[in-house]
Amino acid sequence: MKMEIGHSHVETVTFPQEKVNAFAEVTGDKNPIHIDAEYAAKTQFKKPIVHGIFAMSVFSNILGMRFPGEGTVYLKQEISFKRPIFPDQEYEVSAVVKEINRDRHTAILETKITDKVTGKVNCVGEATIMHETKI
Amino acid sequence: MKMEIGHSHVETVTFPQEKVNAFAEVTGDKNPIHIDAEYAAKTQFKKPIVHGIFAMSVFSNILGMRFPGEGTVYLKQEISFKRPIFPDQEYEVSAVVKEINRDRHTAILETKITDKVTGKVNCVGEATIMHETKI
């Protein structure tokens, strides 16, 4: 099935603290705000926050593996970090198709991470992707 | 020292295949284009490519840890993936200050990843950050 404007994909995700620690290790981004609870307690956030880029990686994951899936080429991503994302909490991640270009096989999707409890938006942006057969 | 327009930071980076594999594990993005050489050989890229988001994570790393460093709050990132980034090759990563807002303590930086050999741009975009004392 080809992607159409309005098609959407929604998942619930959590970012466990141990995965945040592993992400810090792999990327080298060991900013203590992400991995040191004692340090984080003294900041405005009061506790560790998830790397923005780690949060963003859920879109790469969804677009490349499930929606539309294998064969996706990631062309562009824009994201605004509105509110901190905390480890071990549930968030709703959504991708909604906003524009389609059938000639170029490209689509623009709104990508959003929302707090499951408060409904407030944590991150919002747009992904541009290409898929030879599904777009 | 406060950031000024024109200030820049440059590093040479590589994304070893084993770190790409670890990134796939941590984020769950196990698209075979990144981790399966046999699969990748049949694609337009001929060999595995680094996750775009993994490549992007170098900016989070640089901005959060070295330029301007600890205390940086990441507000926004925009990035276009122009050419594939391959594991185990050298790339030049640069961040250049384009705009400063002293009242809000925010800055916009051009963020770029360039092939060290060909000089061609792999990724280019803009980061918006806040730092209470260094901007």
Image (spheres, coloured by chain):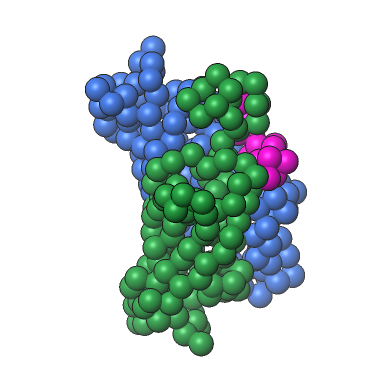
Chain colours: A blue, B green
Towards the viewer: A127 or B123: B123
**Eyeballing the image, is A107 above or below A51?**
above
**Eyeballing the image, is A53 above or below A2?**
below
In this image, B78 relative to A19: left or right?
left
Q: Position of residue B114 (x, y in %)?
A: 47, 53
Which residues fall within the magenta stretch? B16-32
Towards the viewer: B50 or B128: B50
> Quarter of the image containing the C terminus of chain A?
top left
Residue at far bottom of view: B1
In this image, A116 relative to A126: left or right?
right
In this image, B129 relative to A3: left or right?
right
Q: Quadrant of residue A52?
A: bottom right
Q: Residue at x 65, y 26 (%)?
A: B37
Q: Residue at x 39, y 12 (%)?
A: A1
Q: Residue at x 70, y 50 (%)?
A: A26
Check if residue B94 falls in the magenta segment. no
Q: Quadrant of residue A94?
A: top left
**Eyeballing the image, is B72 above or below A106?**
below
Q: Position of residue B125 (x, y in %)?
A: 39, 55
